[in-house]
Image (cartoon, rainbow, N blue to C red):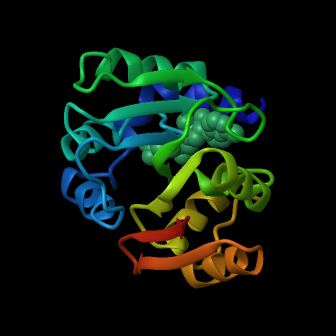
Amino acid sequence: MDEKEFFDHLAPTWDDNEVLSTPDKVRFVLGFMNLKPGQSVLDLGTGTGVLLPYIAEKIGTAGHITAVDYSAGMLSRAKEKFSGLTPTPEFLEMDLEQDNIPGEYDRIILYCVYPHLHEPVETLRWLHKVSLKKGGLISIAFPSGPEFINNVHREKHSESDILPSADELARTFRLNGLDAKVAHSDTDSYIVNIYK
Ligand SMILES: C[S@@+](CC[C@H](N)C(=O)[O-])C[C@H]1O[C@@H](n2cnc3c(N)ncnc32)[C@H](O)[C@@H]1O
């Protein structure tokens, strides 16, 4: 089973097993992204769309949301749940590492996605260059610290999907020319922001 099929397989039970992304936690994490009314937001690896209503709450009716995932199973759950949301999200079945995602965005969010990338630094540099507006922000975020994420991946025998500490990740980005800062990091959440 490849990774896309793996996520397709998980899609029907994803929401029942997602216990960390409580409304308070998601709002807390989004609080570090300086989301404002009218912004355009790209939610990469949207999954079943866990962030979408909370992004909508922040950017309001004048905002725009594009939700991307390469798993048809995950994306169809997101569409079922949130096609009626205001603003109505645009759903794109695309590979964020391989495909050219149309448009430029004020905010690009990768929530619980980073460890699944194959060429993470190159991907982030490309997104920063072509998909992020000047003055915009890319956020790499999780509803827990790296220890929890890494234990989950170890249990699933995905040792390659290891997440470094927030300090280490920000440092790696800076060494690769990106203006990265740790916005918050403790056992309950992890947010690294990259500015343009
Ligand atoms: C751990 S899930 C997180 C989903 C959602 N953000 C959440 O927190 O519930 C990772 C998601 O990223 C998607 N994904 C991983 N690599 C991707 C890629 N290269 N292109 C598009 N989607 C990808 C998977 O299909 C999956 O839906």
The image quarter containing residue 40 is: top left
Q: Tell me where residue 132 appears, x and y as whole percent.
A: 56, 50
Q: Residue at x 48, y 37 (%)?
A: 46
Viewer-closest of 188 and 192? 192
Say which of 181 and 111 sits in front: 181
As drawn, 105 above or below 174: above
Residue 156 seen by the camera: no
Write the residue at 32% across / 50% down. Answer: 19
Residue 45, position as x, y percentages in the image: 55, 39
Residue 155 visible in the shown view: yes
Q: Is residue 69 left or right of residue 17?
A: right
The relative height of residue 50 versus residue 128 in the rendered view (above or below) is above
Extreme-front residue of the structure: 134
Q: Position of residue 187 (x, y in %)?
A: 40, 78
Of residues 70 and 38, which is closer to you in this image?
Answer: 38
Instruction: Tell me the quadrant of the picture where the N terminus can be found.
Output: top right
Ligand 1: image quarter? top right
Q: Position of residue 20 (x, y in %)?
A: 34, 55
Task: Assign the C terminus to one quadrant of the image.
Answer: bottom right
Identify the residue at image location x=67%, y=71%. 178
Determine whether 113 is above or below 12 in the image.
Answer: below
Residue 5 placement, left or right of 119 = left
Residue at position x 43%, y 29% in the image: 13
* 97 lies left or right of 16: right
